[in-house]
Image: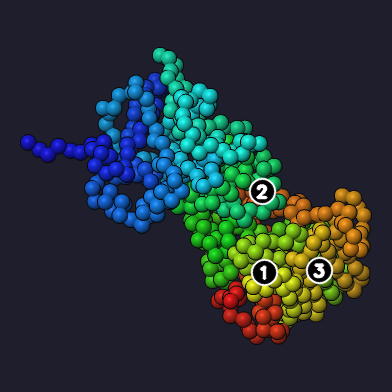
Amino acid sequence: MGRKKKTLHDYAAEFSELAVKRHLLERGAAGEAAVVETLYCTSCQLPMRVRRDRILEHLSSGRHYRNRRLLRQHGLRAPLLLSAGPDVGTGLPLQLDAPSLLSQPSFILAAGTGTGYGMVPSPPSCHKPLVPLHPASAAAPREDPTPSTSASRPSALAAFHVRIAPAPSKQAGQREPVPEAHDSPVPTARHSSGIGLALFGVGLLNKALFQSLLEETGCCLLYVVEDQLEEVERAFNAEFLAGTRVLRQQDADIALNDQRVSGAIICSPPEEASEIVINALRAGKGVFCERLPSFDRQTAEACFDEADRCGRPLVCGFYKRFDPALQFLYKKVRDSQALGRIHRISTISSIYPAASLSFLKTSGGIFYNAAVHDIDIISLLLGESAPDTVFSLGHAFCADMACLKDADTVAVSMKFPSGAIVTLDVSQHCTKSCDQRLEVHGSQGTLRVDNQNPLGITEHGTSVSIYSQTQADRYRDAHRELFRHFLRTLKGKEPPAITKEQFLWTIQVAAAAEQSWRNGSAVDLRSAAIDSSVIKTEIM
């Protein structure tokens, strides 16, 4: 007689950290029900291949050890597995090699407690969810191991509990509708149409861009990819996330492989962004990199080359060139030649509120977080790629900034081949309101962009500010227009406004300005004084 083949339950009984997960699946036009079972690791919430060598390899891996240690360290128990109910039979065949069952699931953060959080697996990625989606009120009672700590508002991700609720019993002849495209409990009109987007990174998400995501009706956010899941709960409310699936970074391929996703919004630090940019482009997605794709010239150039090769747009977040006031100034200076030959340009950019230290560590400091946007505007107004000479002075008035060996106030002077002299004053030491001004002096006159506020009152002095304006408030329209520009590139209506050459020259000038500040001497870009391969200067 042949050897008896082990079942999923045999493996679950043999290995204490494995369990059998059951899904209710509707098939065919008649809506007949079937049960699909998969073998899962309860610590990692990953589907397992029914092979002893693969099981032992996983249980001895560092990944499994870390997940098990985290569960024990925070006093959490493994998430509850699904049950199709006692009324459904179990003697059904199972095809273990089905791709939809072996794909790694995402993890959804339930409302956190003070000491940790519970992770609940979302259904595998497929066109129809394995469990019919029902309102929470219709689902069978289920104990929530991690109740919300907020009494004033519901947890933003608590709505995702209904994704895994057991299907309620149905009367004969009845059939519950199964959503075709959305892996969400309550699809809303906002997510039913429009351009599908995936957001990578939430902790560094700009507030103005976040507002554009909330207000724009021509798109729908299908995925949020973020390892720090509490950031997702803090940023978005449950209503907005009704049609959105939250993934860990390790499951990003689920979003990139979804054909409904046309564009990827990347808010990750430049050190991490380049890999995501290239992966998204190769998956056929257009990319909006809210910050810099990379500090490294060759890596940044590779991102743009990959966009050209794949035929997909790559839009970078130089938002100031989309500001309505600066666009009007550009038309006067460049198209109308209203000022004649440009002699001098001066900018003042005091940021309020100041960026956090953790943000500055990942964004490259004041030159790459703030000055780079003014450099882009100057090059645009002059129509020249880069200056001949750059000289910078700077100081750290904040002790924490001094510890980072970075400055919070800098002055950058540049001379361009046309003879134009440019001065940039950039500060993150503004205490009352952001200060954003720009003056262009030409042979035939001067144009000036002043601070904008709804009161229309110009204030001088050191008393309490009449109107406190943040950086996000001042450039809300600019971020909105930049985001809409990205959506138009996805539709093929226009090419990306920021070209590869413009981006590379801009960050090279920023690198020269930082190098001048650190070395205390002017940098001559004509003699290639800085390394053309690595742009970012190391912060010791």
- Of the 4 image quadrants, the one containing the N terminus is top left
Whether residue 310 is visible here, answered yes or no, is: no
- Of the 4 image quadrants, the one containing the C terminus is bottom right
Which residue extends farthest left? 1
Q: What's under tag 3, amino acid-wise?
A: Thr
- What is the secondary structure assignment of the residue under circle 2? helix
- Distance of mark 3 from mark 1, alpha carbons? 26 Å
Q: Is residue 527 left or right of 135 when viewed as pictured? A: right
Expressed as whole percent of the image width and height from the top left, the position of residue 397 reads 74, 72
The disc at residue 400 is: 1
Mark 1 closeness class: few <14, some 14–19, many ≥20 residues within 10 Å: few
Q: What's under tag 2, amino acid-wise?
A: Phe
- The image quarter in which residue 468 lies: bottom right
- Towards the viewer: 149 or 349: 149
Residue at point 38% right, 46% down? 43
- Towards the viewer: 112 or 84: 112
Asked if 520 appears above or below 29 in the picture, the reply is below
The residue beneath circle 3 is 347
- What is the secondary structure assignment of the residue under circle 1? helix
Q: Is residue 140 left or right of 497 when viewed as pictured? A: left
The residue beneath circle 2 is 210
- Distance of mark 2 from mark 3, alpha carbons? 27 Å
Of the residues under marks 2 and 3, which one precedes in the sequence?
2
Of the residues under marks 2 and 1, which one precedes in the sequence?
2
